[in-house]
Image: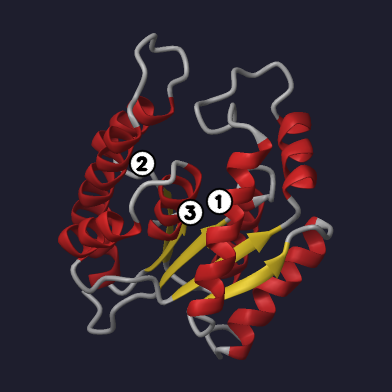
Amino acid sequence: MSEIAGRFLTIEGIEGVGKSTQVARLSGTLRERGVDHVVTREPGGTPLAEKIRSLVLDNAAGESVPATAELLLMFAARAVHLANHVEPNLRAGRWVLCDRFTDATYAYQGGGRRLSMDHIRQLEVMVQGVRRPDLTLWLDAPVEQALQRARERNTGAVADRFESERTEFFERVRAVYHARAQAEPDRIHVIDAAQSSDAVAAQVLEVLWKRTWIS
């Protein structure tokens, strides 16, 4: 086992900004440079956490999920994910590249669902202790543009509970992401996701290069 803890990188953003694409591209770059890493996501990332994910996202279950229940399920999945996947890999010296983390909870459940930010902070401390991402890349694009991309990508697919939300919901989500990026500029880097996939990938690599994490 490595004596050097790995690095914890999170990728954030609303639907349609290209998170999955950029996670895959960054993973490929790290692999080319010989950086030992794992790719994961939230909610999910382990078999049990993926089961919780399905409870949160399924839009055809027939029974509504209250906002408070949604919040608690998010942190239940996160507790499993951290204990069983994220922390063991970091201790082994691997980088963990995660598609969404707690910033998304503040944005979606706090901003989108209008739940108490104080309650989210209490759960964050309970579940995570002092664990925070070493770096967060927020892929930002105008809501209408991002949602149009998401609609084009998901043609014919059944929308999940979040994808079914109105534009106003995502405007509130984006506003919270923006506020968090302003409050923590050393951790959260804003990436202009309105550009091409190649341009976005170049911005991501520039952030890592400036931190001397990659050469």
The disc at residue 107 is 3
Q: Earlier in the sequence, mark 2 or mark 1?
A: 2
Mark 1 Cα-neighbour bin, 10 Å: few <14, some 14–19, many ≥20: many
Please name the residue shown 64% across and 32% down the image.
Answer: 166
The disc at residue 44 is 2
Name the residue carrying label 1. 173
Tell me where residue 205 sits by quadrant: bottom right
Amino acid under label 3?
Answer: Ala
Picture coordinates of residue 112, whole percent (x, y): 50, 44
CA distance for labels 3 and 1: 5 Å
Q: Quadrant of the C terminus?
A: bottom right
Amino acid under label 2?
Answer: Gly
Q: Quadrant of the N terminus?
A: bottom left
Picture coordinates of residue 191, whole percent (x, y): 68, 68
Query: On the picture, is 45 further left or further right than 191?
Result: left
- The vertical placement of 15 against 130, above or below, is above
Tell me where residue 64 sits by quadrant: top left
CA distance for labels 2 and 3: 18 Å
Tell me where residue 178 sits by quadrant: bottom right
Q: Secondary structure at mark 3?
A: helix
Picture coordinates of residue 55, whole percent (x, y): 33, 25
The disc at residue 190 is none
The number of callouts visible is 3
Please name the residue shown 49% across and 78% down the image.
Answer: 183
Residue 148 visible in the picture: yes
* Circles 3 and 1 in contact, beta carbons < 8 Å: yes
